[in-house]
Image: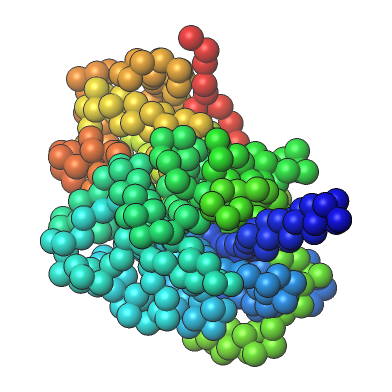
């Protein structure tokens, strides 16, 4: 009898423990960058013929299907985004945030964080996007009380419910967003660790013990947030376009990446994957297990017919512009962020050479642009204006000015200051060669600089061409702000690149050692 009672008690306890566990599936995207249509393996727009042949990835129609199917497989799901819905294709140029809001509402997102590109057209456009959303957009590490468009509207965090459990969501944006975009002078950004921990403490005081951070700060910063905060269960990342996978040797790390008890995930970019993290929490809100993988949005995922029709309609005003053929590529021109943010890349070199070619008869010696300004590659074969606009979508204009040799060194020091951190500031150059040591102390990274075949002279003035974003101090190029003889109103970089490719068609990309790392 006693054994029977003990057995019954044990069974009841086991059943109670089982019911105490809470299963949550976190579906996530990041850095979508207006890729509403399917894309190629180079992240550029994929044509209808290739899409029908099963050669394309992503697109809103596939993403919608995958989200719906995932919801059907799991009882408790949330759908979140790690920022940077804005910018990247003609869709954004034409519609700004309107189309993104419609698609995200239709797919049923629960929250997103603010990416730096959400500020590309200032707080007013971001506010319009926010007003069109059916869910909150979050940013914990900024003081927006001085910005009238966002004050009282932008939330730092939110709490949602699933399966009778409350889940806290916290947003994080890059601390250097004032360098990366155009947030204006009235927003103060601060360390994400401080912003996150403050919100975690408030949520824990309110009895919320399952907390997810939506972070647009990059894979490395996400690991720091996990290490330096308490109470964060999951970080859904963005910004660094990091591909995580536990069974792919080409991935940057496992999915999830565990730092202490915190699970970090990210799903590359451009809607090519839908992240799917399955988390089991115990009664205290501690993670029992976390597993999953980014699901590739290839031809095996059917396209949602209604969304496909909507995107096709939205593309009609854009087709005349983007279908114009401007040249031919002998082979694919690499413009991947992994390459262009770490060293010379074929598309970055082409862009820098195009800019220098346009103004070299104006006494300009060198071109310097940022690897983060290269947003895509181009496939082998026909080159369209739409593809070029996807490579350089920001409507940046060329800026010319003069720097001393010493200031050129300062600018290069900034460019090499975050090598290995997926930072957009890595310089793509023309008219010069550089050797550098990324491991050296600040101010000593640049070793040798040759301009026009001659050694750089510290006191000599050199003519420089860049883009207006860097001229304004973007990506940390503060040296450019007070440059002499500045003219900021040149032609659009995309137009200059298109003309350059046209003049050299069929175009053969080059990658050389114009920027060369050296050891200590």
Q: x and y percent of residue 182 in the render?
A: 27, 58
Q: Is residue 47 above or below residue 354?
A: below
In the rendered image, the residue lying farthest to the top is 520
Q: Residue at x 65, y 48 (%)?
A: 288
Q: Nearer the viewer, residue 407 or 5?
A: 5
User: In the image, residue 262 lies at what x, y percent?
Assistant: 54, 43
Say which of 113 and 440 sits in front.
113
Q: Quadrant of residue 313?
A: bottom right
Q: How many marks can you see?
A: 0
What residue is rendered at 61% in x and 75% in y? 60
Say if 216 sits above or below 105 in the image: above
Viewer can see residue 419: yes
Colour logic: rainbow
Q: Position of 502 compared to 410: left or right?
A: right
Quadrant where the N terminus lies? bottom right
Using the rendered image of the protein, determine whether residue 320 is visible from the camera's viewpoint: no
Snapshot quadrant of residue 368: top left
Query: In the rendered image, which quarter is residue 477 located in?
Result: top left
Q: Which residue is painted at 34% across and 55% down in the image?
A: 205
Q: Position of residue 432 (x, y in %)?
A: 42, 29
* 267 sits left or right of 87 in the view: right
Front-most of 213 and 437?
213
Please, is residue 467 above or below residue 122 in the view?
above
Query: What x and y, as percent, mark residue 224?
Result: 45, 36
Residue at the image position 38 percent from the left and 66 percent from the top: 158
């Amino acid at each position: 009898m006693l054994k029977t009672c003990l057995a019954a008690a044990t069974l009841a306890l086991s059943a109670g423990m089982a019911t105490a566990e809470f299963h949550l599936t976190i579906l996530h995207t990041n850095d979508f960058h207006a890729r509403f249509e399917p894309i190629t393996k180079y992240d550029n727009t994929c044509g209808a013929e290739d899409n029908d042949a099963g050669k394309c990835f992503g697109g809103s129609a596939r993403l919608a299907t995958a989200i719906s199917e995932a919801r059907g497989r799991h009882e408790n799901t949330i759908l979140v985004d790690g920022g940077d819905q804005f910018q990247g294709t003609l869709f954004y140029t034409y519609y700004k945030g309107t189309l993104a809001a419609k698609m995200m509402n239709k797919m049923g997102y629960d929250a997103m964080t603010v990416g730096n590109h959400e500020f590309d057209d200032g707080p007013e456009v971001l506010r319009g996007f926010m007003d069109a959303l059916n869910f909150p957009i979050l940013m914990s590490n900024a003081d927006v009380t001085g910005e009238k468009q966002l004050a009282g509207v932008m939330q730092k965090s939110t709490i949602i419910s699933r399966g009778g459990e409350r889940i806290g969501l916290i947003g994080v944006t890059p601390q250097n967003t004032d360098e990366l975009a155009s947030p204006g002078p009235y927003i103060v950004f601060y360390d994400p660790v401080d912003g996150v921990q403050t919100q975690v403490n408030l949520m824990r005081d309110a009895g919320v013990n399952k907390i997810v951070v939506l972070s647009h700060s990059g894979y490395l910063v996400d690991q720091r947030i996990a290490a330096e905060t308490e109470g964060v269960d999951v970080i859904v990342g963005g910004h660094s376009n990091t591909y995580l996978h536990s069974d792919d040797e080409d991935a940057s790390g496992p999915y999830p990446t565990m730092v202490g008890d915190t699970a970090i995930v990210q799903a590359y970019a451009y809607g090519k994957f839908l992240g799917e993290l399955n988390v089991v929490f115990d009664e205290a809100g501690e993670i029992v297990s976390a597993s999953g993988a980014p699901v590739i949005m290839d031809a095996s995922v059917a396209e949602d017919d209604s969304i496909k029709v909507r995107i096709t309609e939205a593309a009609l005003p854009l087709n005349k512009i983007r279908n114009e053929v401007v040249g031919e590529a002998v082979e694919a021109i690499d413009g991947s962020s992994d390459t262009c943010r770490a060293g010379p890349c074929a598309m970055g070199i082409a862009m820098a050479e195009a800019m220098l070619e346009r103004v070299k008869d104006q006494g300009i010696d060198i071109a310097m642009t940022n690897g983060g300004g290269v947003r895509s590659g181009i496939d082998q074969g026909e080159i369209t204006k739409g593809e070029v606009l996807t490579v350089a979508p920001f409507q940046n204009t060329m800026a010319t000015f003069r720097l001393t040799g010493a200031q050129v060194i300062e600018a290069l020091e900034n460019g090499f200051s975050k090598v290995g951190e997926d930072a957009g500031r890595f310089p793509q150059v023309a008219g010069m060669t550089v050797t550098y040591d990324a491991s050296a102390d600040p101010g000593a990274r640049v070793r040798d600089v040759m301009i026009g075949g001659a050694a750089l002279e510290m006191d000599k003035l050199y003519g420089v061409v860049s883009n207006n974003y860097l001229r304004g101090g973007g990506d940390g190029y503060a040296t450019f702000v007070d440059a002499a003889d500045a003219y900021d109103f040149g032609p659009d970089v995309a137009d200059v690149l298109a003309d350059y490719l046209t003049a050299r068609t069929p175009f053969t990309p080059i990658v050389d050692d114009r920027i060369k790392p050296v050891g200590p």
